[in-house]
Image (spheres, rainbow, N blue to C red):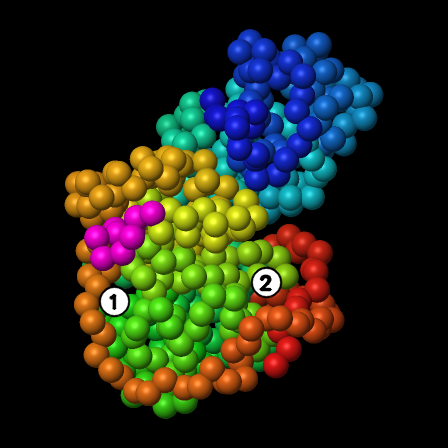
Amino acid sequence: MGCSSSAQMMPMKSVKPLAGLAAMEQQHPVRLPCLPGDVLVSGNLPRDVVDKLAGYCKGWLYIEPEQDRWFMPECIRDRGSNLKLVPFKPGKDSSIGAMHKMFAAITKMPRPLMIQCSSANRAAVALLLWMALRYGYSKASVNQLLHDLEFYTVRSETKQWLENQLPEVGKVEPLIARSPEVIQLYDDDTTRLTYVIACQVTLQALLIDPVERKVDRDLALLRSMGLSLKYVLNTHAHAEYGTTSSLLRQTQPGLCTVISQASGADADVQVSHGQRINLGLLQLEVRETPGHTPGCVTYVLRTRTATFAFTGNSLLIRGCGQTDQGDARQLYRSVHQQIFTLPGDAIVCPGCDSKGRSVSTVEEERRFNRRLTKNEEDFVDRMEKRHFSSPQLAVGHALSDEMPCPPVHKKRSLSCPDFTTGAATLAFDMQEMLAEAVQEQCTDAVQEEFSEIHISSV
């Protein structure tokens, strides 16, 4: 069950290897999944194995009843592990309060952390539920992860319970409670994903990759939240780009449209690699990721609690966009150099998905993306020979039917004050203000310590 963190790549959270773990995994129901990489799951274990693991794990979360005969609290504590008892039975003890207690325990307990139940079934589900809430997975995303991590101990009825706790893609609420700045929207017909990013303090907002037929939906949502739309960002030019921008401008006359300079498409502002886009107290970094088309970019948002990469069609969940109108070698290098170099727990927000998956993480894609984990030559060969043979690639092509974009309006000078090169930074100590804003949005979420936010000087 599960890929071992001893694989070639580093896990999302690196921990010191445990000598003899591979042998334990062969003989007992214990695993250290490569994701997140610092949490083990296990079933009932003999005392000698508990003794050895308790000396390695700094935290131990036991989710069986205290009177269970396999519970060895003295052994665990004697080895210096921080023990916490949180009984958890999906379907029986699955109240919001119980799930929050478990989520809080997994979040706060020291690493390496052991989650133990009788068979590793519920321990794996507890870990998956924690990951889903932390990274914003839909039920399809968790099913993808179940497959990739080879969690064979998860029973069908427990899997069904887990699915029932998770949203479908595009549910109108923050992707993750700890960072309410980002909302994901979904169009069933085109399978395209649009993102709302909002500054919780100034109530300024922007849209990333809006869909023409969903403009009314997007504007109604912004009005209902009391947000002022300032920018529309596009990750690349596509057939309806000009029409969508025109529709939005009809009701938002002060709107500023943004696209990459390399795209050749018209917009108020054309951006290039390394520039920063300021939205209230938030800031997005522009990273050029050409290959799907010559003008593709990825926007990187770093909030106080998470990192998001809005990758468009450059990087999809377990796939990538087509390159028949781009360059396969360029796409491979773009993803590896500009996206895969982000922190492993950075949340990948793709431009489309046909399977109902919401997001992924950089580490997931570094490990499990079956195209981009190939070497460069194999990737180029596959992309050049099989442009339309793969369902995932066909989706990327169908949703990015690249056509010359008709002129919309003249582009604005790059001296626009909210667009900067990021050469110098000025630290803003806004911890208390942002903490209050986040707290109002997610009172039940576990809050992490805020770090300083840096805004490029103008």
Give coordinates of residue 444: x percent, y percent: 61, 56
Pointer 1: what residue?
238
Left-right relation of 318 to 23? left
Residue appearing at x 25%, y 43% in the figure: 383
Q: Which residues are magenta?
A: 321-329
Q: Identity of the amino acid at label 2? A: Thr
Cβ atoms under marks 1 and 2 closer than 8 Å: no
Pointer 2: what residue?
303
Left-right relation of 449 to 382? right
Residue furthest left as drawn: 388
- Reply yes or no: does residue 327 show up in magenta: yes
Q: Quadrant of the C terminus?
A: bottom right
Q: Identity of the amino acid at label 1? A: His
Q: In terms of depth relative to the viewer, which is nearer, 401 or 99?
A: 401
Give coordinates of residue 171: x percent, y percent: 39, 58
Relative to 49, say whether 172 is above or below. below
Quadrant in the rendering for residue 79: top right
- Residue 374 seen in the current view: yes
- Reply yes or no: does residue 326 show up in magenta: yes
Q: In terms of depth relative to the viewer, which is nearer, 70 or 185?
A: 185
